[in-house]
Amino acid sequence: MELTYSFQVEATLVANEFIDRYMAEANGEYVKVYLYLLRHRLEAPDVEGIADALNHTEADVKRALLYWEKLGALRLGGESKPASRTRAGAQQDTASAAQNVSAAQTASAAWNASASQNASAAQTASAAWNASASQNASASQNASAAQTASAAQAPPAALTPQTRPAYSQEQVNKLQGDGDFSQLLYIAQRYLNKIFTQRELEVFAYLYDGLHMSVELLEYLVEHCVQSGHTSLRYIETVALNWHEKGLKTVDEAKSYSSGFTKDSFSVMRAFGLTDRKPGDAEKEMIERWFGNYGFARELVLEACNRTMEFTHNPSFRYADKILSDWKKAGVKSLGDVAVLDEKRRGQGKQSAKSGRKQTNQFHNFEQRSTDYDSLVLDQVKGWIGEQQGEQ
């Protein structure tokens, strides 16, 4: 088969090693990021610029950079501009001196030297990673044979961090031989800026192997929590279990759920006049119950918030929760149902008030007598005075 290339100048060299060894296993979006970096190796583009050029999100670009760094295909520089060097990045130091030399020969020689250096760096990084994993694996020896068996069973009906089956050190070590799981751990540790303990490794082992959550979904989970200011692994695990209970399988589903929940939370906080802070844990739980468990539309929840402010003059989540709980028991589905319920209660109130008046008036419904007790007493007094004068 003969191929005719449309582009004959301004070529970018791609190492055969990259094509033969890395490209087939890599995500296509990751390959696009790598090729873009290779093309702009002398410019040191930042994450924002790469995302704009490739129609990616900045988070997508960061994941790609971390992926290639783990494999040793590039080395990240400073925090602000992690897309600093690729396999061809070593040419930056000699590019200006080589401008007057044959471009193809200079680039080829520089590439070969860089490829050799990066291959050694990849081996060194791999050895360091294995050593770290071995240290973490030996940090805990509390798992028993019964716990090992329970990890392979189906998850319990009510998933919580307390009911999570424990994974043994042997199981975690075996999973680290899985390339996808190893990549997940590497990226998660970079996001959280820490080396995981045995217990933390067990958490990810359970989410990945026990609940069968995809690497992409778990990577987004960590990113989502970190960007929200939550770096506690317990919090991350709780969110993961919640997503699993909700049946979220893909990153798009998780993004949609997270986005909708954020909008609902913000609308409630705004209705309460609390726009200067995020809802607390107990408040989040109630908000999630209103929208998730009760399934109320936003207009119903906001109506309950408005009534709370009208009656209490304070942003009371408990008062709003009582209103919404009563509406749930009454089968309310819309604002129209609320109006019907209000009218029914007003009717019951009028009937109760009418009944109360009847009970009060029965004490006054006696037959009026014509006897003038004041005149009778006065006559008796006059008679008594007359008798006294007659005796004198």
Image (spheres, helix red, strand yellow):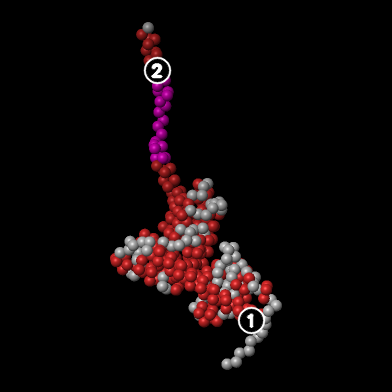
Find numbered disc 2 in the image and state the secondary structure of the residue it sits on.
Answer: helix
- The spot of residue 169 in percent (x, y) is 36, 66
> Is residue 197 found left or right of 313 in the rendered image?
left
Label 1: how many Cα within 10 Å (few below 14, some 14–19, many 20+): few
Q: Which disc is residue 381 wearing?
A: 2
For the point 40% across and 66% down, which residue is it?
134
- The spot of residue 75 in percent (x, y) is 55, 69
Label 2: how many Cα within 10 Å (few below 14, some 14–19, many 20+): few
Q: Which disc is residue 105 wearing?
A: 1
For the C terminus, give its image quadrant. Answer: top left
Q: Earlier in the sequence, mark 1 or mark 2?
A: 1
For the point 53% across and 61% down, which residue is it?
227
> Is residue 50 found left or right of 309 in the rendered image?
right
Give the residues in magenta: 360-378
Kindly indicate the quadrant of the structure image that contains residue 129.
Answer: bottom left
For the point 65% across and 73% down, which residue is it?
95
Q: Amino acid at mark 2?
A: Val
For the point 48% across and 59% down, which residue is it?
231
Find numbered disc 1 in the image and state the secondary structure of the residue it sits on.
Answer: helix
With respect to residue 116, does 296 lie above or below? above
